[in-house]
Image (cartoon, grey):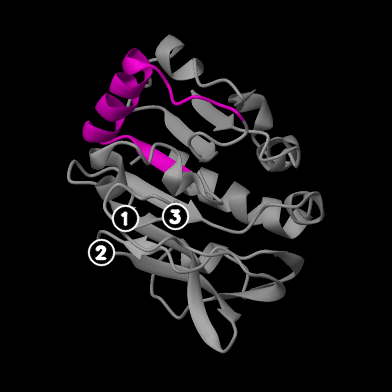
Amino acid sequence: MILFAADDHFGMHPGKNIFEGLRRRNEITFVENDPGVFGRVALDPAHDLLILHQIGKTCDQEFPDEKGMENIRRYCENGGNLLLLHGSSAAFWHCDWWRELVGFRWVRPGDPDGVVPSTHPHAPCTLRREKIRHPLAEKLPAALELPEDEIYIELEQTAPLLLFMTADVNFRTYPQCVETRTASGGRILSFIPGHRPEITTMPGLRGIVDVLIDDLAAPQ
C-alpha cells in the first residue's frame, strides 16, 4: 500500500493537487486533514510507502494519537521508506526521534531543540539537477522553472545527505531534493517545492514526484 497523508495547507490543498495528477494515483490511498489514519493503518516496512505533505499542528490539525505515533515510529525504525513533500520533515516535529530521523528538517518556531527557525522567501526559482552519479538523478529533469511560491530554505541537516536538486535564492544555493537513510536502512526522499496551486498542478513538478515514488516503491 502507498499511503499519502496531507493537510489542506491553509486552503491551498497542495497534497491533493499533487495526488490528483500522479501516474500511480489508483494505487495510492490519499487522506487530507485526517491524523487518525495513522492509528487505523499499520504500514508494512517491507512492502508499503508513506508519503506526507503536512506540518504538525497546522490547519487546526492535531498530532496523531499515541497509537498512531507508535505505528509511524515502528514503520520508520523497521526500515520503511518515506517521501516528504514541502514541509513534511516537520510533520511530527514534537517527537525527538523524528527530528533526528528525517535528516533535513523544516524547523518550526519554538523548536524543542532551540534551533533557529527555517524561512520561506517568496520568489520564482529554477530547480536544477545536481552533478551526482546516481541512478535516480538520471531520471530527474535537468531543470524546472517555477513561478513565484514559498521557497523553503535554511533547514537543519541532522544526518548525511545525497543532494539531487537545488534552487538559487538571493545568490545562495539551497537543497530542494535530498535523500538520507535511517539507521535501519530505510530511505527518506525529501522534495521541498510545492505550495500554491499554480505550482502543485504543474505537470513538471508532478512528474518529479512520480519519479520519486517509483524509485521508493521499486523492489529492493
Tell me which amino acid carries mark 2. Answer: Pro
Residue 28 placement (x, y as % from top left): 60, 27
Residue labelled with disc 3: 106
Q: Position of residue 117 (x, y in %)?
A: 43, 60
Question: Mark 1 packing: few (<14 Cα in 10 Å), some, or many (20+)?
Answer: many
Q: Is residue 81 magenta?
A: yes
Between tags 3 and 2, which lies in front? Answer: 3
Residue kind at label 1, given as amino acid type: Gly
Magenta stretch in the rendered image = 60-83
Marks 2/1: CA distance?
A: 7 Å
Query: Residue 180 appears in which quarter of the rendering?
Result: bottom left
Among all residues in the image, which is located at the extreme top? 40
10 Å crowding of disc 3: few (<14), some (14-19), many (20+): many
Quarter of the view holding residue 98? top left
In the image, residue 75 lies in the stretch drawn in magenta: yes
Choose mark 3 or mark 1, whichever is in front. 3
Q: Is residue 122 above or below residue 92?
A: below
Q: CA distance from mark 3 to mark 1?
A: 10 Å
Using residue 204 as the reference point, say whether residue 218 is left or right of it. Answer: left
- Is residue 199 left or right of 175 when viewed as pictured? right
Tag shown at residue 80: none
Q: Quadrant for the C terminus, please.
A: top left
Residue 25's place in the image compared with 18, above or below, is above
Tell me which label, 2 or 1, sits earlier in the chain: 1
**Does residue 1 sit above or below 186 in this rendering?**
above
| Towards the viewer: 183 or 194 | 194
Residue at label 2?
160
Do the residues under discs 2 and 1 have CB atoms within 8 angstroms? yes
Residue denoted by label 1: 103
